[in-house]
Image (cartoon, coloured by chain):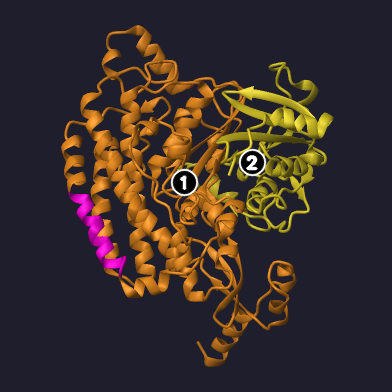
Chain colours: A orange, B yellow
Amino acid sequence: MAVAEQTQSIEEQRRWEGSLDQLRGLVSERAITGETMLLNMGPHHPSTHGVLRLLLELDGEQIVSCLPDIGFLHTGIEKSVEDKSYEKAVPLTDRMDYLSPMSNNMAFSAAVEKLLDLDVPERGQIIRIVCLELARCASHLVWLGTHAIDMGAMSVLLYAFRERERILGMFEMLSGQRMMSSYIRPGGVWRDVPDDFLPTIKQFLNDFPAKVDDYEALLTKNPIWKDRAQGVGVIEPDVALAYGLTGPALRGSGVNWDLRKAQPYSGYETYDFNVPLGEHGDVYDRYLIRIHEFRESMKILNQAVARLETVQGPYRSENNKYCPPLRSELGQSMEAVIHHFKLWTYGYDAPDDEIYNAIESPRGEIGCYIHGTGANKPRRVHFKTPSFIHISALPVVAKGYLLADMVAIIGSVDIVLGDCDR
Amino acid sequence: MEIPAARDPVDAAREAFGDAVLHVKEFRGETTIVVEALRAAEALDFLRVTSGLVYNMLSDVSAVDYYPNDYGDSFDGDESDYRPERFGVSYHILSMLYNRRLRVKAFVAEDDPRLPTATVVWPAANWLEREIADMMGIVFEGHPDQRRLLMPDDWYGHPHRRDYPLGKETVAFSFNVDEIHEHKPFAKD
């Protein structure tokens, strides 16, 4: 290409066809006059944790305002669910928060159970707790690795993913899938735990606490880490509440609110564990909380595994109008065959009414609103996802900090774009 | 500090808003208060600040579409259910102090779907309402940012309405690939 041509094409690219008037009222007046700089961060940026685009208004290095732009990963899950029977919608929920699919399965299944008024047997509940806490660890491990690599600590990612691989191996044992497990379903779980699962998880529970100490040895007292994290991205408790933050982002500000304690589900009230709280609401406190949550999850897992050995019985509801009969019954009982056929062809009817049910995912409150139709498909399903809320609060958290701090802030509120866009 | 005794949100709302409280429903232990659409934000603010209620957190805002015939005069379902208009907007609010949830619901009509924004009450409502405006086509009056949120700016229609078709992609096989490509807009030339 001739040099003249090339220059012209670059000139063309530089010409922006949009108008600054579109942003009037959203960015400060100084951006309109050109006094401050508007800078796009993302959607293809490694530290935006997915396809998040931030339009930053910068005064030098300082962030004056921030406009998040989401929707790049919108897949219409809520719309698709309207065309599926309740049981068949579970695999779609895996794909929302792809770092902790079990929590999504649980949010949806628990909501359907509430709508149907369906009980889950005790063993099913214990298996669910094991899955949820393993998912919390797996999700926090990805958060830890990526957050550290964003801030320049390369090696933590490798260690964190090494342990996460073991958890994903256990998910594969349970469900046949490493990530998109669809294991927790309305009425219980898909199947009982396999024989080799218990020895594997015991080995993991034995090894993991030492690994958490290793991560702490790398980061907690590391002066570079402390310089980057302490006093950065401070969220005041009243701001956190007004913006609806939940999970570690809220607890980092010292608000003692954990749905596992406040509104227990699946038998969390019978386990002994603590809810770690922060003091300053900065990036460092949110880091410490998640590190402590590893240890609290270990506590819960140890108790749950011990119960799993003693509590026997069904792992999903025996109400065959809602849950498939056992495979072994199919050859002997005509009724079981009818139930099985009816469930996989039609599904089941749910009342023409609405419910909202929330659980505590690794990121915060994940709520599920379901409005039934009286028939086998929902009228409306809406997921209130923590990442969505947390990104909406980014502008107020980031304001006044430096551009380099933005990376730390995004990492510390722990967002997943699949969770945000659905 | 002494915590004031919890008040019944239904009684409190009836006392403060009288006829603007249109209906009250209980289902699976969840209370729904249906209020007049134009006074929804006012009612939410009342529930947030009044002592004994203190619903300090907005958990979720979601909208439901009763199209085609599950609302108004053509609705022949459960008598106890109340669905005067096509769209229902639900605010799920949470009181951390008394550890309870409440749903405040407002119905808006098909031909004029508008209600005042709750962004002034909770900033959290900003994006949740923007999503509904984008996906359901309900206008939140006074909302500070009325751009689309999830869909592209030039998108036509509101995907979560029940009369918006759920698109499907026809699978291309050798025998029908030409037919499919004929009416596909992708760059052939």
Q: Position of residue A108 (x, y in %)?
A: 47, 35
Q: Position of residue B101 (x, y in %)?
A: 59, 35
Q: Residue furthest front?
A: B1
Q: Residues within 10 Å of mark 1 (few under 14, many from 20)?
A: many
Q: Nearer the viewer, residue B173 or A120?
A: A120
Q: What are the residue bounds of the magenta stretch?
A: A207-221
Dot 2 lies on which element? loop
Q: Which image quadrant is residue A344 in?
A: top left
Q: Nearer the viewer, mark 2 or mark 1?
A: 2
The stretch drawn in magenta includes residue A343: no
Identify residue type, mark 1: Met
Q: Nearer the viewer, residue A306 or A151?
A: A306
Mark 1 and mark 2 in contact (Cβ < 8 Å)?
A: no
Query: Residue B55, labelled with which disc?
Result: 2
Identify the chain of the residue marked 1, using the numbered disc in the image: A
Identify the chain of the residue marked 2, using the numbered disc in the image: B
Residue for point 63% across, 37% down: B4
Q: Which image quadrant is residue A318 in?
A: top left
Give the Cα distance between marks 2 and 1. 28 Å
The stretch drawn in magenta includes residue A219: yes
Q: Nearer the viewer, residue B175 or B48?
A: B48
Dot 1 lies on which element? loop
Q: Residues within 10 Å of mark 2 (few under 14, many from 20)?
A: many
Query: Residue B36, labelled with which disc?
Result: none
Query: Residue A96, labelled with which disc?
Result: 1
B164 lies left or right of A134: right
Identify residue type, mark 2: Tyr
Q: Position of residue A214 (x, y in %)?
A: 23, 61
Q: Position of residue A277 (x, y in %)?
A: 42, 52
